[in-house]
Amino acid sequence: MEPEHFSHTSVLLFECIDNLNIRDGYTYVDCTTGGGGHSLEIAKRLGQHSRLICLDQDRQALQAAQARLSGYADRITFVHTNFSQLETVLEEYRIENLGGVLMDLGCSSYQFDTPERGFSYMHDAPLDMRMNQDLADKHALTAYQVVNTYSENDLKRIISDYGEERFAGRIAHMICNARVKAPIETTSALSDIIRSAIPKAARSDGPHPAKRTFQAIRIEVNHELDVIGQAIESAVRKMVRSGRIAIISFHSLEDRIVKNTFATLSAGCECPPDFPVCICGKKPQIRIITKKPILPSASELEQNPRARSAKLRVAEKQ
């Protein structure tokens, strides 16, 4: 039975599954299995000659998904790894019939809702934010280390770049001032510092004042943006012709990487425009299915407000 704390509503569920165009005789990969919501719907549609590989760097998530999908165990392989290792996994399992890949980027509801993981400003917990808690040695980067050891300039940079926070400078400065007196150890302590750094007028509406900074620190801890483009390229390289890749993003930084990587892979000739004939020989690798991203419906947003920033982009291997 699925653990209660893994209750999770999968975003853009049927839009994703429909766009994967699942066919018998092919292998599909859920790169970010989480609680297994998307994987379950893929598994329901697998033919007798099909297979599903479920990846996740969060061992607890993978264990919960394994329990949830136990009825389809004969067709599913679970692998504890980050999706940056997609190509390695495909080679290890000798997958030559990759028909589709799904990526649901960012942090899962379970991770936000488990206070001791330290992802949320809504709960008081130690500053952690590691998606892969197996990385527990003294060299593993945690939110505590980012907050307490990064220079003011580096804090300003990640809060500005990864959080798109206009008060990044003020927040970084106040974090550095506060940690001189004592280390900042909890999510509540960090949230209070961020709140005090943002002018009252800017706190009167919009999202929680700590949201962007927590997002930035989480991205830094888990190197989330570094692997997206590489993983997309790996998936496309390994997919069979007419295979599909479907990617859900939750903020503009992720979506921009997906959009730009798709654009690059769908482009053909790169020769200068004044060349009379093509000499580079480059052909488009994918066809973009979603010219504009698919957004959650009004009914989905009513049932799951967390889906409000989700965007789904889909491409097909040429």
Image: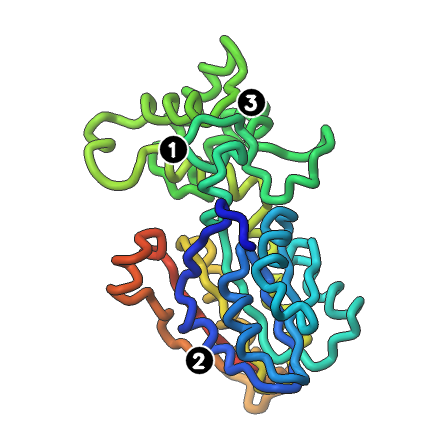
Residue at point 52% right, 21% down?
Answer: 185
Using the numbered discs, state the Cα–Cα distance from disc 1 to disc 2 in whole angstroms: 38 Å
State how many labels appear.
Answer: 3
Label 1 vs 3, first from the N-terminus: 1
Q: Which residue is mark 3?
A: 148
- Asked if the residues shown at circle 1 and circle 2 are in contact, with their CB atoms under 8 angstroms apart, the answer is no
* Mark nearer the N terminus (1 vs 2): 1
Residue 27, quarter of picture? bottom right
Vertical arrangement, residue 40 with respect to residue 160, above or below? below
Q: Is residue 4 visible?
A: yes
Query: Which amino acid lies under the numbered mark 1 shown in the image of this protein?
Result: Met
Residue 158 in view: no
Q: Residue furthest front?
A: 1
Q: Quadrant of residue 170?
A: top left
Residue drawn at the location 50% of the way across and 56% of the way down: 105
Q: Please, what is the three-letter code of the amino acid marked with disc 2?
A: Ile
Residue farthest to the top?
181
Q: Name the residue tied to disc 1.
A: 122
Q: Which mark is residue 141?
A: none
CA distance separating discs 2 and 3: 44 Å
Q: Is residue 111 left or right of residue 55?
A: left
Image-based side of 246 in relation to 311, left or right: right
Q: Earlier in the sequence, mark 2 or mark 3?
A: 3
The spot of residue 244 in percent (x, y) is 54, 78
Q: Which of the two residues, 215 or 285, is positioned nearer the viewer here?
A: 215
Q: Position of residue 225 (x, y in %)?
A: 54, 51
Mark 3 Cα-neighbour bin, 10 Å: few <14, some 14–19, many ≥20: some
SS at mark 2 in the image: loop
Q: Which of the image's four quarters has the N terminus? A: bottom right
How far across and how far down the image is residue 90, in percent?
Answer: 73, 69
Residue highlighted by disc 2? 289
| x 43%, y 21%: residue | 189
